[in-house]
Image (cartoon, rainbow, N blue to C red):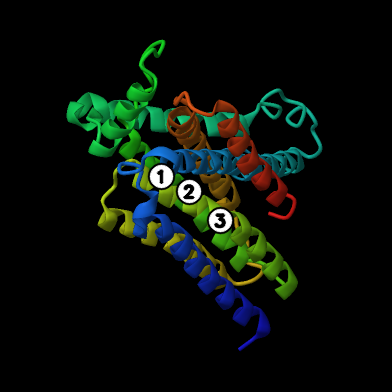
């Protein structure tokens, strides 16, 4: 076996095992269930959730959005160069305002509105889908008890399970492309460096996903199945990268991958801003501590972005 192939197979199993361990940890231990938590236990879980919210925020901006914008810009530049070559040096196409259009931001926004549309259709066609789970009822009931003089209703968490599913799908797209990037690395050093960078942030992100599934009241069997499905995405992408012969022309695959990355980034930001952050910051207790936890989670992801 070639050393490079052996290293990539080791990375495949590392990504699989780390995702399973970090994702199943909050699912398998009842300590992370907020329905039965009271007092200090509940406050610790709230701060832990705020930290995971900061991690999601950092992953959305510093990793998924940044990678999507870079990929889309790179592919657009390739198209500009190709068009200018075909037009035999005519610079009118290259200087066209269409080439300066923010396509990356547009695609990310389309991902945002696509999930918004799916959620609106689900609530329009199935009004029962807006019903709150038992866990959410207990959480928001406790919040009202702690703050009887609240100035208005708290943000509704009724769409938590649907948004958790969207979160899983967007992360799955992103994980496939991460694994694909590892599988396409040409050297052992580049493979190990990229794999370590992915492992550093993927463990925390997947832990946050498992914690989110528990908090929205997902059944243990469905939560385990969801984590298992998410864990398989990076190895599948890596295996696809191994199956691509070196030097094969990608054609339009690069642009398609960049577009899918942009859509996934938009869905991730939708869930982060409309589900995770409002839910964690709505409670009245310890606002500065919550801010610190969100900032700490984001700062760690920003630090990891130096290598990822």
Closest to the observer, 116 or 294: 294
- State the quadrant of the C terminus: bottom right
Cα–Cα span, label 3 and label 1: 15 Å
Numbered disc in front, either 2 or 3: 2
> Is residue 287 shown above or below 39?
above
Which residue is at the front of the view, 31 or 214?
Answer: 31
Q: Quadrant of residue 166?
A: top left
- Residues packed near mark 1 inside 10 Å, few (<14), some (14 to 19) or many (20 plus): many
Q: Position of residue 181 (x, y in %)?
A: 61, 60
213 and 176: which one is in front? Answer: 213
* 220 in relation to 244, above or below: above
| Residue ID at (61%, 65%) | 182
Is label 1 in a helix, a strand or a loop?
helix
Estimate the spatial distance between the alpha carbons at disc 2 and disc 3, rounded to whole Å: 10 Å
Query: Compared to 226, does 20 lie above or below?
Result: below
SS for dot 2: helix
Q: Residues within 10 Å of mark 2 (few under 14, many from 20)?
A: many
Which residue is disc 1 drawn over?
212
139 on left or right of 185: left
* Residue marked by disc 2: 208
Label 3: which residue? 202
Other-residue count near label 3 (Cα within 10 Å), few / some / many at <14 / 14–19 / ≥20? many
- The reply, left or right, for residue 163 in relation to residue 301 is left
Instruction: Give the number of the mark in front: 3 or 1.
Output: 1
Residue 282 % position (x, y): 45, 25
* Residue depicted at x 40% and y 33%: 115
Tell me, yes or no, whether the two marked residues, 2 and 3, touch with CB atoms within 8 Å.
no
């Amino acid at each position: 076996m070639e050393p490079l192939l052996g290293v990539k197979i080791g990375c495949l199993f590392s990504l699989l095992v780390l995702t399973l361990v970090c994702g199943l940890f909050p699912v398998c231990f009842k300590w992370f269930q907020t329905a039965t938590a009271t007092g200090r236990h509940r406050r610790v879980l709230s701060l832990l959730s705020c930290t995971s919210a900061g991690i999601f925020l950092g992953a959305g901006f510093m990793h998924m959005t940044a990678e999507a914008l870079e990929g889309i810009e790179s592919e657009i530049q390739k198209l500009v160069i190709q068009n200018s070559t075909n037009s035999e040096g005519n610079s009118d196409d290259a200087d066209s305002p269409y080439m300066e259009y923010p396509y990356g931001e547009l695609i990310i926004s389309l991902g945002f509105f696509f999930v918004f549309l799916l959620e609106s259709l689900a609530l329009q066609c199935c009004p029962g889908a807006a019903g709150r789970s038992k866990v959410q009822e207990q959480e928001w009931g406790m919040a009202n008890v702690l703050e009887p003089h609240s100035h208005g209703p708290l943000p509704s968490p009724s769409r938590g399970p649907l948004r958790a599913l969207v979160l899983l799908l967007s992360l799955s797209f992103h994980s496939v492309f991460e694994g694909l990037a590892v599988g396409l690395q040409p050297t052992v050093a580049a493979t190990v460096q990229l794999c370590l960078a992915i492992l550093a942030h993927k463990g925390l992100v997947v832990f946050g996903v498992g914690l989110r599934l528990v908090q929205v009241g997902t059944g243990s069997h469905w939560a385990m199945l969801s984590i298992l499905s998410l864990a398989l995405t990076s190895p599948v992408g890596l295996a696809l990268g191994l199956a691509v012969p070196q030097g094969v022309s990608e054609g339009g695959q690069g642009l398609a991958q960049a577009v899918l990355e942009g859509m996934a980034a938009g869905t991730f930001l939708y869930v982060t801003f409309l589900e995770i952050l409002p839910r964690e910051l709505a409670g009245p207790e310890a606002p500065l501590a919550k801010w610190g936890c969100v900032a700490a989670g984001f700062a760690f992801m920003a630090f990891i972005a130096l290598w990822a």
